[in-house]
Structures are given as structure tokens and as C-alpha cells.
Image (tube, grey):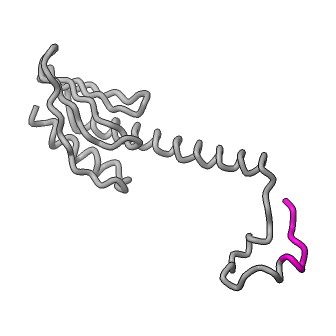
Amino acid sequence: MLAKSPDQMNAMSPVDDDPLAAFELPPDVMSSTFEHAISDAASHTHERGHAVASALQRKLKGSMVEYGFPGVVTVHLNSGAVAQCGGPAIGWMIDIVRAPGEQPVTVDVNIAENETDTKVIAEVISKVLKKY
């Protein structure tokens, strides 16, 4: 990190009261920092998807629940219907196919974008899926 000189720090506007504003990161370090931040966010989102899939498996007895790339939860229901739910990275809308070859029925489960409680998400999704 390169520290600014005292003259440069004094020239900072009074609006800039960020104590870290006096430091500049070289581009290679800045790039690496952003890559780690993106990676950390993606890992957290991915783990949330697994937690929702696990909670759905417990709620939908006799169904098979999978979570995989690219963040989609797939539920093979007892009835034979197959539901694909967008995961935390792409929204929780559900496409349900009651029988092979049929057109999917799309259901918006109305889960807030900022909802992170996996039990709440699984509860809302399971209520919808139990109808099929």
C-alpha cells in the first residue's frame, strides 16, 4: 500500500472523512481483493442453496431434493411432478412439470430478494410444492 504524503492528506476535502482514503491499493492487489469478495459472496449463496435444499428434503417426506449448478433446487415430488426452483442467486421462482412432456407451470413464491433465513424460504416453497 502506498500512503499519501501529509500534503496530499491535507489537500483532501473535508467531505472525505474516510480514514482509509489516505491509502491506495495497487491494481493487482485491488483486483485480487475484488475476486476474493466475489468468491466469498458466491460461496455464501451456494451454501444457502444447500441449506434450503436440506430443509426442503425434511419438509417434503418421500420426495427427492437436489441442489446443483447453476444454483437450482430440483424436487422430485411423490406425485411424480418435478419442480425446479431458482436458487438464491437467481430468485426463487418455481417451474413445475406434473408429468413428462407437459408444459411447466411457473409459480412465483413471493420470497423477498433479501430473505436469508433458509427455514423461512423452505417453508414458503414447501407450502407451494405440497399442492402438486
In the picture, measured across the screen, residue 91 lies left or right of residue 45, that is left
Q: Which image quarter: residue 83? A: top left
Quarter of the picture holding the N terminus: bottom right
Q: Which image quarter: residue 38? A: top right
In the picture, measured across the screen, residue 20 lies left or right of residue 131, that is right
Q: Residue at x 22, y 50 (%)?
A: 110
Which of these two is toward me, 113 or 117? 113
Question: Farthest residue in the left direction?
Answer: 131
In the image, residue 82 lies at what x, y percent? 20, 24
* Rendered position, 4 above or below 126: below
Q: Residue at x 69, y 80 (%)?
A: 17
| In magenta stretch: residue 114 | no
In the image, residue 119 lies at what x, y percent? 30, 49
Q: Which residues are magenta?
A: 1-8
In the image, residue 124 lies at what x, y percent? 21, 47
Q: Residue at x 34, y 36 (%)?
A: 54
